[in-house]
Amino acid sequence: MVKRGGRAELACHKLIMVGSGAVGKSALTLQYMYGEFVEEYDPTKADSYRKKVVLDGEECQVDILDTAGQEEYSAIRDNYYRSGEGFLCCFSLTDAASFAETAEFRDQILRVLGDNNTPFLLIGNKSDCVDSRQVSYEEARAQAEAWQCAYVETSAKTAENVNVVFDQMMRMVRERKRTARDRRGEAGAAGGAGGHASAADDGSKNAAGGRRDDQGKSRGQKKGFKCVIL
Amino acid sequence: MERSPLTEEAPAFSELTILESYAEAYSKDFSEAQAIDARLVTDLAQSEAENVRAIMEANDQVEAIITQLESAIRELDSIEAWSETFKGQLKVIGDDVQLIQSQNKAMHVQTRNQKALMHEVDELLAALSIPETSLSMLREESLSTDQGIVKAEEAAARLLRRLNNTFDDGTRDMYVVNERVEYFQLHANNFAVRLVDFLKISFTFQADTCISEYNKSGAVASFALNGHRSLEESLSRYRGLMLWMKEIDPRRHNELLDLYAQAVNVAYKQETKELLDFVVGVLMPKKQQHEDTEHLFTSTTKGGYLPPTPTSGGPMRKYDLAGALAKAVQNIISAVVREQNFVTDLFHLGTSYGYMGWIRNGHKTVGKLDRPREQTKDVKLKKRMMGIMDDLFKGLLVDLMASVEQVARVSSIVSIALLATVEDLLQQLDNSNQQYAILMLTNLQKRLANLYDRFIEEQLRAIEETKVTAKKRTGVLPFIRVFPNFVRRMENALEGCNTAVRKATDDAYAKLVQKMFEASEAIARESEVHADDKEQLNKHILTVENMHHFHLEVRACKVPSLDPFIKMSKASYDLHLTTYIKMNARRAIGKMLEFFDGVDVLLKTTAPQEIGFHVSYNKAQLKKVIGQYPWKEVKRSIEALYKKVNKHFSDEDGLLQVVWHGIQEEFIRDHGRFTDLLQRCYSDTGLTLEFSINDLLDTFSELAKNSRRR
């Protein structure tokens, strides 16, 4: 632990790319990581990426887990969903089925994490393919609104909105970590050492209270996003 | 009357005609013949009478004429005598006239000659005289004001014109001419001496000013020289007089050049020394050792982990400083280029125009000084230039070399940035007049290339040594951790460079990567013999972690020459990851795998229904193998494996997920394969595995649920 001191100081945000196969999760990741667009399709099993970034003038690390889109059994995703702090749920604008499947991914994430406030973004990729579009902006936005999350359309090919979604996701993760830390701090001060369970209790109550708060915030963010997209 | 036309037709025969007319008349009228006869007789008598009378009268007249003729002859004789006399007299006069004429001609010549002589003498006098004011200007006019310089230039032009006068042999021998020429030369000489004395002081003064201005300017803080603008501006004013000097006294002109070089050398020496000292001082941080371990390979690094490059103010500043010496050298070379151009223009080196032309055509402005100029073909001039430049920058190369060595000792990256700059400068100066700068740069390049090679050798050796000294044999190896930083630093130092050092660096990368791969392989191999690693998994963990890190980080460096190695690392990562996963699966359900693998092999030659008859694969064997893996056992193995994998990949969270994902898939795949084979080959036995796919999935979910959120 001591030897890791250097890195521990640097916040590391763990993001997970989820969504059906061939929607462009890896393409988005590679575009973000290396600024490259990789055209050939090679189904991912699971790949881990890490990058040092400056977010709002603050240095941090982002750890991206790029996952397989077409496993037979969703249960094997449980484990890495547990490791995720923010989810970029992707579908292809040219594939209505992939849009429909986002619901399954979301359900599983919520189930595994047992937490409705996990930073989550709905991402419609391949926005450059105007002609073969199957999912309308309104449709997808309605879905996002129902989920109370933001919706962004991206293109891994043209890099449109790619940095935007990753940066936004990191901000959401960072914000969430801050409030969690503050809460822990308050709880620790109030409950003392003995009340570990009650502190956790407190936390969950706060989380419930904070949920409304967060939702309010996420709506605010959504508005911000609308501006970006429109 | 009818005959009249006849008469008209032949007037020549008028006499005949008359006779004929008579005849006709006769024939016509014979009566008239008498009359005619009578008339004829009368006519004849008459003419005879007249004839006699005439003869008688003529005698008297002849007498008179003869008398008159005689008198006329007398007169003529007298006239002849007179004309003889006149003739004699005229002859005398003619001689006189001739004499006078020749005398006159001679007088004309004399006059012309005298006029010519007058002119000649005038010219000579003009050539030999000079207004005293001019001479006094040369003696006394202030040379420090622009006005004074113009006046002195004019006076000097006048003097030069006198001295340039060519006299013919005779004139040259004239005492007065000699005396005057000597007089002019004396003045020229005096002025030359005065000019040298004046400029000597001026050179030193200007050089001193340059030094103090440099100190005041603070240019050193931006690793720059201040330039000698004020000196150039001030001395440029004397370019006319320099040319005069060059023409009238080449030796003194040379002397001036030497004096200039000496004076300015002092300035350059001081300035470059200050600059280099400053740069070297800045580049020698106290905590060098620590910072270098981030991007350089050291065999002494303890442990497997090095903190990643902190990117606070410190290292960023250091990034800029890597270019400090390069920038300093760039500025020094710019100064050398400019100085050579300036000294060429100031002293009119290699030019052919004369002073008189210079004065006539107005003062030529100094040429562009900052750009290298075209190479001269004049070998003598080239040599001379080298000599002058050597005087001007005496000791600079030595100082530069010393600084380079000093900096290279502590920061190889700096010397690589410098090498890139030096090569770039050499490219810019190629084929130019800047022989001296090229010579200096070539020397630096050689030395730096040498240091660079040595540096890479050292790095290779350090990697080699890590192989032996590395204590920790897990996690990302120090050199793999360092390499991306190293590449980034190198690329930063070489930014935009496409000279020889670019190629050298790509070659160095290749060597280093090869060495690193070799070393990590050796370390991985060695870890196998470690006592606590019975399963020989360490090798794969180490390779997976290291290749993953290499692939991830080096790919982000975006260096084209590293692409093949990125692919290699990816392939190695894939291979070892698969092996690790398979080995772990084998550990949990090994016997079963072995059994069904055997079935798979057998299926290639045997029909599915007949597998059961094979002695090693009959129902009993199958039952035995299945019995060995009750769900409780398998579940425990999976749980133990989960813990183990968590431990193995504790340093890399992302990788843990990747590996566990792979293992889960592997179990599911194996389970699917087993069920499939049971169905195909053993459906009649009614035997099934002791656990279902859902048992596996539930366990995976359970493990996920219970795992501490990281």
Image (cartoon, rainbow, N blue to C red):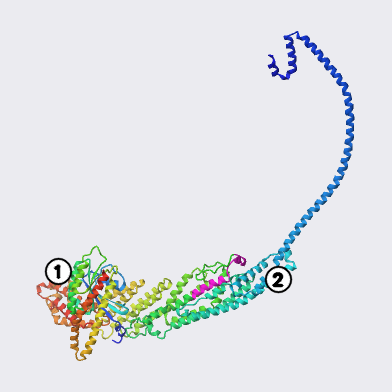
Where residue B172 sits, quadrant-wise, is bottom right
**Do the residues at discs 2 and 1 belong to one chain?**
yes
Residue A131 among those drawn in magenta: no
Horizontal and vertical percent for residue B537? 25, 81
The amino acid type found where label 2 is placed reads Glu
One can see residue B446 in this view: no
Horizontal and vertical percent for residue B583? 23, 78
Where residue A12 sits, quadrant-wise, is bottom left
Horizontal and vertical percent for residue B373? 51, 68
Q: Residue at x 67, y 68 (%)?
A: B163
Query: Is residue B546 shown left or right of residue B400?
Result: left
Numbered badge on residue B607 = 1
From the viewer's side, name the closer residue of B579 and A82.
A82
Q: How far apart are marks 2 and 1 (CA)?
A: 129 Å
Please, what secondary structure does the residue beneath circle 1 have? loop
What residue range appears in magenta? Answer: B332-360
Query: Is residue A190 shown left or right of residue B433?
Result: left
The amino acid type found where label 1 is placed reads Ala
Q: Which quadrant is the N terminus of chain B positioned in?
A: top right
User: Which residue carries the number 2 mark?
Assistant: B182
Residue B335 among those drawn in magenta: yes
User: Which chain contains the residue that carries disc 2?
Assistant: B
From the viewer's side, name the closer residue of B206 and B339.
B206
From the viewer's side, name the closer residue of B365 and B497.
B365
Q: Main secondary structure of the magenta part?
A: helix
Query: Can you say whether B374 is above or below B646 in the image?
Result: above
